[in-house]
Amino acid sequence: SPSSGFAGEVEFFNIDLVDKNPILVNDAGNNLVYLMDKKGEIIFDWNINEGNLGNDCFIEDSGKLLAMVESENPLIQLGGHGGKVELLDKEGNVEWEFTYSSEDYILHHDAERLPNGNLLLMVWEKISANDAFSNGYQQEINIYPDAIIEVNPENNQIVWEWHMWDHIVQDIDENLPNYGNVLENQHLIDINYNQKDNGDVSHANGISYDASKDIIYLSVNFYHEIWAIDHSTTTQQAASHEGGNYGGGGDLIYRFGNPTAYKNMDAPRLFHNNHHPNFQGDNKFFVFGNGTDVSQSTVYELEVPEEFLDSNNAYNDITILWSFTDPELFSARVSGAVVLPNGNILITEGDFGIWEVTREKEIVWKFSGNGFYWRTYSYTINQLQSYGIL
């Protein structure tokens, strides 16, 4: 692993405006996680011993690296699968791990630490071809809808869970379960929106949490949406359509990005694939819109309503506060955006590298390398010194 040397090429367009703090680069293509300065020099790296990166990894307030990695012999191998989450010290020693991987389920993509210390983890669960078809899915194939589990790392027990499969609607066969009008049931998920031959019907790829409202935000790539899920529910309520702070159990309390996912063809559509729902507080997000329809990506800063209203038009009430695009900015996969200490925006373009742009949309710095860049995070030198990493 390149524990020293340069990770790739950098270009300075306005060096005076570049944030000088190191960034954490997650190169899933080369199975590398490293800290890099803005000259492109690797100043620290982690030895990911076991398996490939199962996508996200980030430094926590403890100074430890939380990493999604592949479990041994994963039996569900959709793009972005993992199966295991590990907490690593700076020497690469595994201090804690949780494996959730079988022929029936697998961890994937992303994790989110809750204020209580528990972890939200994303799961694909297998629904058999027979169960899928008999519940109104149009194809008789195994499908893998998304679920979320909350794990207590003290004992590795699952203390809460939510399943997309409990909140579906279908308009194919009135004699089968979950039959209804998709447009009139926007709090439910049209299970037939995607017909994928590999059964990867939803392909969520990022999770974020609003502690002030106890809401989980899930980026769902194949629905081209972000879903808001009430985390105040019990597991029993989360499997139902009532209970919790919002009264709807585990039904979607809000969704945005693609009205066609619930057959609203009149409202404006924002996303054609989306990644990294990066919650900022105060109802604000950064989201990477991959833009696969136009082969051009856009980074959005968005604001969701203060109150979520259960009416047909309110599901699209999203405000674009800021956006950045460029003819050269395009990745159909992964990618994301974070705010730097100096206020600039750090954009990960998965198939290319990393951009730094100002709020005035001036490109001040770029990095490109021979990798596949899942996400990039920023840490100040003071933070890294306090963690004992630098």
Image (cartoon, grey):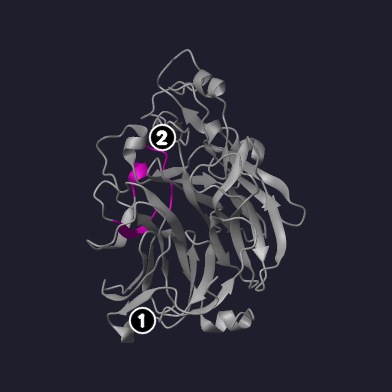
Of callouts 1 and 2, which one flags the residue occurring earlier in the amino acid sequence? 1
Residue 18: assigned label = 1
For label 2, the SS is: loop
Q: For the N terminus, which image quadrant?
A: bottom right
Most extreme residue toward the bottom, as rendered?
16
Q: Which residue corresponds to mark 2?
A: 186
Q: Mark 1: few, some, or many residues within 10 Å (few <14, many ≥20)?
A: some
Residue type highlighted by circle 1? Val
Real-space Cα distance between discs 1 and 2? 43 Å
Residue type highlighted by circle 2? Gln
Residue 100 rendering spot, x and y as whole percentages: 66, 45
310 part of magenta stretch: yes
Residue 26 rendering spot, x and y as whole percentages: 49, 64
Q: Is residue 223 rendered to the left or right of residue 292?
A: right
Q: Vertically, is 8 above or below 31?
A: below
Residue 50 rendering spot, x and y as whole percentages: 65, 58
Q: Mark 2: few, some, or many residues within 10 Å (few <14, many ≥20)?
A: many
Return the residue nearer the eye: 348 or 184: 348
| Residue drawn 33% across the image and 83% down it | 17
The magenta stretch spans which residues?
297-317
Q: Vertically, is 344 above or below 198?
A: below
Q: In the picture, residue 286 is in which quadrant?
A: bottom left
| Residue drawn 53% across the image and 83% down it | 381
| Residue drawn 39% across the image and 52% down it | 333
111 part of magenta stretch: no
